[in-house]
Every structure is written in structure tokens, then in C-alpha cells.
């Protein structure tokens, strides 16, 4: 799988942007402690603990989704992927549900699935739920991600990014993982299907 230099830079920018908030909050917590003369009050400790956990969850998710966590030819269990997606995506107005029994999945295919989950979560501007299903169809591995919620659907720029023929110079840090998903699917000879919004539901699917 070959990735354009600009795409790699944008993926790094995306990861840095998403980690910045949590790290900034940790800094705020330490500043509060310093202002109190080194006294570890409950508010400061809560800020640091919550922000550290959030940053760790994001790093773990992106390590597998974008990086080579585990090795290029390794496998990972669907339960591990479930934990990664719930820890990173669930919270506030978004819930994550997995309907799949635990199984081992090739790591490159797992990257595709996590990116589909990320795109699905971003297709819910007002919150909702993400459901993930893994199946085997005629000996072929299949993924389905259903995003349900008010206003569910892809933004036009993300829809455009899910195309390997797009000019990479038009990508941004907010859409680059859409292109990365399309490249992953192509490298796996996977059929990527984006189903039109139906009411408050939007679906993504991939068949290896």
C-alpha cells in the first residue's frame, strides 16, 4: 500500500489535533495544582485523570487504525477492536454497539474496519449510535457499520474523499482518513459500499 507524502502529513496532523485537547487539559490540571501550592485537590486530579485516559484511548485507536501497531501481517481479535472503538468513540451523545462474536481478523482488514467506525461516528452530527457487524459471506470477510441518529449522513467533502482517484491536494486533516480508507480497501481488494441515507440511518460496508 503506497501513501502520498501529503496524505501521511495530513494523517499526522489529524492525530496531533485530536490529541491536543487532552494534553492541553492535563497542562491545565497541573497549572491548577501549581496555583494551589502543590496541593492535589480533587478538581485538578479529575482533570488530569480524565484527560490522560482520553489521550491514551485515542493513541491506542490511531496506532491500529493509521499505524503499524501489531505488525503488518499480524492479526487482532474483534474483541480488541471493539474495546478500541468504544474507548475512543463512545461518550456524550454517541454509543457504540458490536453485534459480532469474537474472531481473529487480519490487521490490515482491522484498520479498514476502525476507519469505517470513525467515518460512521462523524456521520452523526447530533449524536446517535454506531453498530458494527462482522460476517463471512461465501468465504469472504465482510464488515458493516450502521450509523443511526438525527441528521445521519456523510458531509459532501467526506463523500468526495472516499475515492482513490481524488486529487490529494484537496484533502484536509478532517477528510484524509476517508481517502486512507479508500486506499486500504483497494489494497485489500475490498468492495467498499456507501449506502444512501435512509431517514436517520447511514450505512458503510466492505467485503474483502
Image: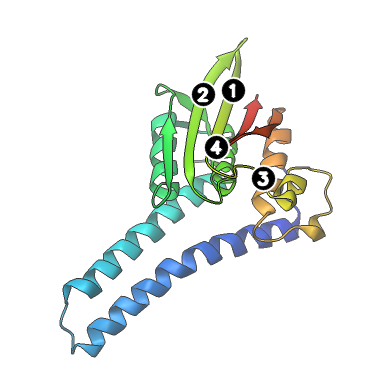
Image quarter of residue 33: bottom left
Residue 69 in sight here: no
Count neighbours of disc 4 (C-alpha within 10 A) and say few if under 14, some if 14 to 19, many if 20 or more. Answer: many
Which label sits on residue 142?
Answer: 1
Judging by the rendered image, the residue that carries numbered circle 3 is 154
Instruction: Say which element carries label 3.
Output: loop
Count neighbours of disc 3 (C-alpha within 10 A) and say few if under 14, some if 14 to 19, many if 20 or more. Answer: many
Instruction: Say which element carries label 2.
Output: strand
Distance between mark 4 and mark 1 Cα atoms:
17 Å
Left or right: 98 as drawn, with respect to 204 = left
> Do the residues bearing badges 1 and 2 touch, measured as CB atoms within 8 Å?
yes
Question: Which of the pair 39/159 is nearer the observer?
Answer: 159
- Which of pointers 3 and 2 indicates the residue nearer the eye? 3
- Mark nearer the N terminus (1 vs 2): 2
Quadrant placement of the C terminus: top right
- Mark nearer the N terminus (4 vs 2): 2
Distance between mark 3 and mark 4 Cα atoms:
10 Å
Which label sits on residue 181?
Answer: none
Colour setting: rainbow
Q: Residue furthest top?
A: 138
Judging by the rendered image, the residue that carries numbered circle 4 is 147
Count neighbours of disc 2 (C-alpha within 10 A) and say few if under 14, some if 14 to 19, many if 20 or more. Answer: many
Image quarter of residue 26: bottom left
Distance between mark 1 and mark 2 Cα atoms:
6 Å
- Mark nearer the N terminus (4 vs 1): 1
Quadrant placement of the N terminus: top right
Amino acid at each position: 500500500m503506497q501513501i502520498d507524502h501529503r496524505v501521511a502529513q495530513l494523517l499526522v496532523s489529524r492525530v496531533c489535533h485530536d490529541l491536543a485537547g487532552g494534553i492541553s487539559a492535563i497542562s491545565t490540571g497541573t497549572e491548577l495544582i501549581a496555583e494551589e501550592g502543590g496541593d492535589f485537590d480533587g478538581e485538578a486530579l479529575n482533570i488530569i485523570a480524565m484527560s490522560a485516559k482520553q489521550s491514551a484511548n485515542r493513541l491506542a485507536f490511531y496506532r491500529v487504525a493509521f499505524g503499524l501497531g501489531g505488525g503488518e501481517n499480524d492479526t487482532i481479535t474483534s474483541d480488541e477492536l471493539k474495546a478500541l472503538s468504544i474507548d475512543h468513540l463512545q461518550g456524550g451523545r454517541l454509543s457504540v454497539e458490536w453485534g459480532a462474536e469474537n474472531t481473529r481478523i487480519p490487521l490490515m482488514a482491522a484498520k479498514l474496519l476502525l476507519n469505517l467506525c470513525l467515518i460512521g461516528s462523524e456521520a452523526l452530527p447530533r449524536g446517535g449510535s454506531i453498530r458494527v457487524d462482522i460476517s463471512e459471506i461465501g468465504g469472504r470477510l465482510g464488515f458493516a457499520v450502521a450509523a443511526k441518529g438525527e441528521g445521519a449522513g456523510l458531509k459532501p467533502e467526506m463523500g468526495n474523499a472516499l475515492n482513490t482517484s481524488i486529487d490529494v491536494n484537496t484533502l484536509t486533516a478532517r477528510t484524509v482518513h476517508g481517502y486512507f480508507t479508500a486506499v486500504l480497501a483497494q489494497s485489500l481488494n475490498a468492495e467498499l459500499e456507501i449506502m444512501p441515507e435512509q431517514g436517520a440511518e447511514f450505512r458503510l460496508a466492505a467485503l474483502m
